[in-house]
Amino acid sequence: MQRMNLNREKLMKQIQVYSFAAHDAQLYLDSHPNSKCALDYYLKHKKLEKRAVAEYEASFGPITIPNEACTWEWVKGPWPWQNDKEWGN
């Protein structure tokens, strides 16, 4: 269980890092729309974020509500930012 928590926390941290980097690049692109380097950086981090989210969701459940959700499965476990101790496990 301890190892699973570490993997979950590591993946969540990666998602946060990639998301922040992509968002920061997006803000930069607002004022530098012709920067190919910034666009490449943005696209790279969006791809890394998408891959990390897919890996996280495959192992630990959804981070956000899917558009096609018919049930609320995502509420059956801890929230992505909670650890097992906070959840009561």
Image (tube, rainbow, N blue to C red):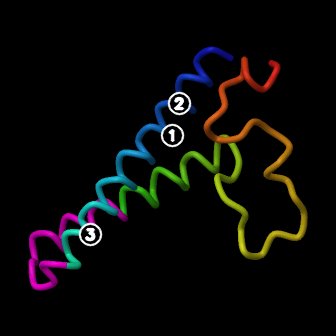
Q: Is residue 86 above or below residue 81?
A: above
Which residue is drawn at the image coordinates 9% and 78% (left, top)?
A: 35
Between residues 42 and 23, which one lies in front from this camera angle?
A: 23
Left or right: 44, with 1 as reference point: left
Closer to the chain start, of discs 3 and 2, is: 2
The amino acid pointed to by label 3 is Leu
Q: Secondary structure at mark 2?
A: helix
Mark earlier in primary sequence (1, 3)? 1
Q: What's the magenta region?
A: 31-46
Pick out the residue farthest to the right: 71
Circle 2 residues within 10 Å: few <14, some 14–19, many ≥20: some
Q: How far is disc 1 from disc 2 in space, using C-alphas?
A: 5 Å
- Give how far apart the Cα atoms at labels 1 and 3 are: 22 Å
| Residue receiving disc 2 | 9
On the rendered image, what quadrant is the C terminus found in? top right
Q: Determine the residue positioned at 62% across, 24% down.
A: 4
* Left or right placement of residue 37 versus residue 24 in this view: left
Separation of marks 3 and 2 at Cα, in angstroms: 27 Å
Residue 27: give its label: 3
Q: Quadrant of residue 1?
A: top right
Type of the residue with mark 1? Met
Residue type at mark 2: give it.
Glu
The secondary element bearing badge 3 is classed as: helix
Is-magenta flag for residue 43? Answer: yes
Percent x, y of residue 29 = 20, 75
Find out whether the residues at labels 1 and 2 contact each other: C-beta distance under 8 Å. yes
- Quadrant of the rendered structure where residue 87 is? top right
Q: Residue furthest front?
A: 31
Magenta portion: prevailing SS class: helix
- Under circle 1, the secondary element is helix
Q: Would you name the residue on which mark 1 appears?
A: 12
